[in-house]
Amino acid sequence: MNKRVLYIVPGLLVLGVDRLVKMLAQSTFPHVLIPGVLAVVPAQNTGMALGLFQNHSYLILIVSVLLVLFSIRLLRRIRPGGLAAASISMIAGGALGNMIDRVAYGYVIDMFKPLFMNFYIFNIADVGVVVGAILCAVSLRFRPQDWSEA
């Protein structure tokens, strides 16, 4: 598979699905998706992951911009392949999705609320960042060859 596809497609998928779901969530009322598991509860998040830095949108925006720029630099400089490239792309796509919200609204649109535990409401971009980070760690541990491609 062409490495450029691995650089772009996972991030674009995260970004595209995130934008679509956020658009749909803004026009819906709270409802249960999976009884006892997951509900859609539209919310405005002025913080970041796990409720950190509430009402510090500019600081979070700067961190998001730096994360996206770092991801792009990493993809261009190291030119990772396989799982490594896909994971970095997902992280960048998720960061970009939330960054768009911060610039457009001053907050991030969250909508998924776990019902089986007391946890924060999150969105698809958050899932992209977390899954991308997990895949990044997995690739570092089990696929180091993905990081040495040039």
Image: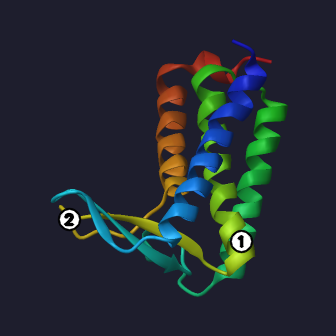
Nearer-the-camera pick, 5 or 48: 5
Q: Is residue 29 visible?
A: yes
Q: Secondary structure at mark 1?
A: helix
Q: Position of residue 139 (x, y in %)?
A: 53, 27
Q: In the displayed image of the protein, which residue is found farthest to the top?
A: 1
Left or right of 122 on screen, residue 69: right
> Which corner quadrant holds the C terminus?
top right
Q: In the displayed image of the protein, which residue is found farthest to the bottom?
A: 55
Left or right of 14 on screen, residue 135: left
CB contact under 8 Å: marks 1 and 2: no
Nearer-the-camera pick, 114 or 39: 39
Rendered view: 47 above or below 50? below
Nearer-the-camera pick, 18 or 81: 18
Amino acid at the residue labelled 2: Met
In whole angstroms, how far apart are the C-alphas of marks 1 and 2? 29 Å
Task: Name the residue rendered at 62%, 31% in the picture.
Answer: 86
Q: Is residue 52 visible?
A: no
Q: Secondary structure at mark 2?
A: loop
Q: Position of residue 62 (x, y in %)?
A: 75, 70
Which numbered marker is on residue 3?
none
Q: Position of residue 1 (x, y in %)?
A: 69, 12
Rendered view: 121 above or below 130? below
Q: Position of residue 58 (x, y in %)?
A: 72, 80
Q: Earlier in the sequence, mark 1 or mark 2?
A: 1
Rendered view: 44 above or below 33? below
Classify residue 65 by image quadrant. Answer: bottom right
Which residue is denoted by mark 1 in the rendering?
A: 61
Task: Name the residue rendered at 15%, 59% in the picture.
Answer: 36
Amino acid at the residue labelled 1: Leu
Which residue is denoted by mark 2 in the rendering?
A: 117
Q: How many marks?
A: 2
